[in-house]
Image: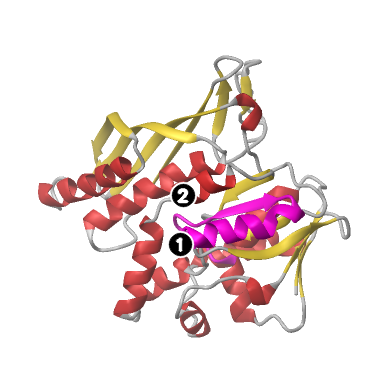
Amino acid sequence: MCGLDFPDDPNVIVGMKQADDAGVYKITDDIAIIQTVDFFTPIVDDPYWFGQIAAANALSDVYAMGGVPRTALNLVAFPIKKMTLSVLRRMIQGGLDKLREADVVLIGGHSIDDQELKYGLSIMGFVHPDRVLTKKNLRIGDRFILTKPLGTGIINTAIKAGLASPSAIDTVTRQMAALNRNAASIMASYPVHACTDITGFGLLGHLAEMIDDGGPGIELDADRIPVLPEASEYAAMGLVPGGAHKNREFREHMVRFSSSISRVFQDILFDPQTSGGLLISVKADHADDLLHALRSAGIHAAAIGRVVSDPEGLILVR
């Protein structure tokens, strides 16, 4: 937001200048708070599942910063004249159940009458000031581990078109509602240098954020990147959300694709994700152990690439 003069404070560890997943403010030498907020319109028909997904998505930013979420505030826009209160109750119940799973307490919120249903949460968590994870600390040689398959945006587009199979709907819904809590807890025991969660900018968009200030380069192994079942099929049918095309337009100048990478797979890499997985940059000689630990915990994780010194500021997909 160029031209705006934001208030500053020496205790801000991560703020508007860094543009990371969440803000971080130092309270003491041992405690910092993480603050984040997110909300959106329904992406599934069932209000209970929508509530779960919205909560999991909001919590994810705290996990990506290396923190532990503790409190939440609800944000609700509800068309009171168009929908029954049972829809609102089911949606809120979904959010509450997901917060309970995360050991997070709801302490308040705010609601308004609106023409369109929207739901999300503001989350506060804790982290040690010396253990904050950001996007901008990549080290040459680090390996990238992704903890959820790609393709949620494409499958959600297929759902809206009435073309998604029941199995695809069930799979994508459960994945979006899954917390990144276990993955975050496991990675805390390893030398992780940087982390983010994959959401609206897609995998390539979020990788670009990690190197868009002239940082190192990134090399991705296309055959190791996990994709949700049926996502490739729907992408080949043209069921690609508009956000994927916007992501491509914004970041394609930073990406170099091998001739073997199909347009369909490129669309998947730009596909905006909802409540996506963590993208973890870990010291190379610990990557296999971290990957094994994640998979042993039932997390669909994959080692998908590495940080390279050349070419600087570009993402190579091979």
The reply to whether dot 1 and dot 2 touch (C-beta < 8 Å) is yes
Using the rendered image of the protein, determine whether residue 122 is visible from the camera's viewpoint: yes
Which callout, 1 or 2, points at the residue further toward the start of the chain? 2
Q: Which residues are magenta?
A: 270-299
The answer to which of 39 and 50 lies nearer the viewer is: 50
Q: Quadrant of the C terminus?
A: bottom right
Query: What is the quadrant of residue 78 in the picture?
Result: top left
Q: Which mark is residue 298?
A: 1
The residue positioned 65% from the left and 61% from the top of the image is 204
Residue with the mark numbered 2: 182
**What scheme was used to colour the molecule?**
secondary structure
Q: Position of residue 250 (x, y in %)?
A: 66, 58
Q: Position of residue 112 (x, y in %)?
A: 25, 36
Q: Is residue 101 left or right of residue 226?
A: left
The residue positioned 66% from the left and 35% from the top of the image is 18
Around disc 2, counting alpha carbons within 10 Å, would you say few (fewer than 14), some (14 to 19), or many (20 or more)? some
Q: In the image, is residue 198 above or below residue 157? A: above
The answer to which of 310 and 208 lies nearer the viewer is: 310
Using the rendered image of the protein, determine whether residue 114 is visible from the camera's viewpoint: no
Q: Amino acid at mark 2?
A: Asn
The residue positioned 78% from the left and 45% from the top of the image is 213
